[in-house]
Image (cartoon, coloured by chain):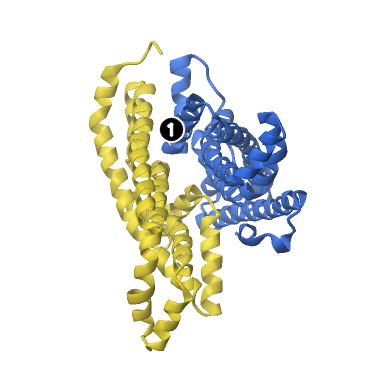
Chain colours: A yellow, B blue
Amino acid sequence: MNNWDWSAVADFMPAFWDGLLVTLQVLVLGSLLSFSLGLVWAIGYRGPRWVRWPVNLFTEFIRNTPLLVQLFFFFFVLPEWGVQAPALTTGTLAIGLHYSTYTAQVYRAGIDAVPAGQWEAATALSLPASRTWFAVILPQAIRRIVPALGNYVISMLKDTPLLMAIGVLEMLQQARLASAHSFQYAEPLTVVGVAFILIAYPASLLMRALERRLVR
Amino acid sequence: MTAGLWTNWIIPGIWITIQLTVYSAALAAVVAFGIGIARTHHSRVVRFLAAFYTEVFRGTSALVLMFWLFFVMPGLFGWALVPMWAAVLALGLSYGAYGAEVVRGALNSVAPAQREAGVALSFTPWQRMRLILLPQAVPEMIPPFNNLLIELLKGTALVSLLGVADTSFSAYLVRLATQESVEIYSVTLVIYFVIAFVLTRGMRVLERKTKAGIGITAGAAGAGGTR
């Protein structure tokens, strides 16, 4: 451990903050996308058979294949289909889509946990489908699933470095550029590794606390 | 795609992916049982160290860990790893940390009376673990382990960023050669999906076997059986 150089850490910090900002941007937008798409899949799971079956197949396929390959797929294929998007947008879309298949499972579990009597009551009151979902079922389901969704946000955070593969300037890519520039590999990569732990650990403590409060 | 691309790149790539999955899963299983059992140890120091390990390795990103092992360790400690083993180490250590939580949860879910019965029969701690706790805990672990195994399989794709010629890497080469992105990347996704499907089937069989070992048949398996 004799060749650790603190000045290399100092040199890397400005690029690190830029990278952190991009990482958080991907995380926030990716989470929002996965929360909303996941809800669409979860409602699809409860639909008639011709909806349920394709939705199941599609989400199982996305969930069981690597995010990295999906990133490359979108990165190379979207331009061929005539969609020119910056790498950051492509990456956020891919990560949001990938995680929506996980949040869909969370929603499904949360929706299944709502007692059947609630559905029956909504039917008895002849509420329209949209009111049943948004006024009766989801408010009860969401409460139980917040911690589980939060845990997937943390997982997503740990998957954001994959976006460096398509050239997004998030933390890991910034570290790689800095080390290629200065030939000091140890410091930037270690800073990034520690940064992930420093963000993920308090976040997971928070989720555990939420779980104790909300899920009873 | 021509036959040459298949035999020279894609098939060897699939083989590398399978090897990576098997080696990393083996390492992860050792870590998971070691750390998971340590987390139920009676000494507070052992429990703390094991918890520290899980938090650190669950907290960091597998890709960052992989890069760190590959690029930083040689400089700091003076020994270098070939990319393949850096990848196995990174995947095994981080998924082992996730697995340790599964092992701990399953061990804690065994009824306390079972452990007390072991004490009453004056079993040694190791006999208690081997003969009483693990046989009842292992079937509970299989469904979450299956999920982790699929995550691990997906994680092996990261090694292509270190230049290991796995399935994803061969897909990249084939794309460069043929310029047909849709075709090769769709094929690659299907390959991973098929491997994941086979792994899931295998784990179902394993679950039935371990359950049968402690006298639970598939019909009476209850909630743990379907996932």
Q: Secondary structure at mark 1?
A: helix
In this view, B124 is above or below B142: above
Relative horizontal placement of residue B211, taking residue A44 as reference (left or right) = right
In this view, A39 is above or below B204: below
Evaluate whether residue A173 shows in this view: no
Tell me residue B155's x, y (percent): 53, 43
Evaluate whether residue B21 shows in this view: yes
Name the outermost residue toward the top: A2
Local crowd size for mark 1, using a 10 Å CA cut-off: few (<14), some (14–19), many (≥20): some
Q: Return the residue nearer the eye: B86 or A44.
A: A44
Tell me residue A83's x, y (percent): 36, 61
Q: How many marks?
A: 1
Q: Residue at x 40, y 61 (%)?
A: A144
Tell me residue B122's x, y (percent): 71, 31
The picture quadrant where one finds residue A170 is top left
- Give the residue pinned by disc 1: B56
Relative horizontal placement of residue A194, taking residue B48 as reference (left or right) = left
Q: The disc labelled 1 sits on which kind of residue?
A: Val
Q: Residue at x 66, y 30 (%)?
A: B125
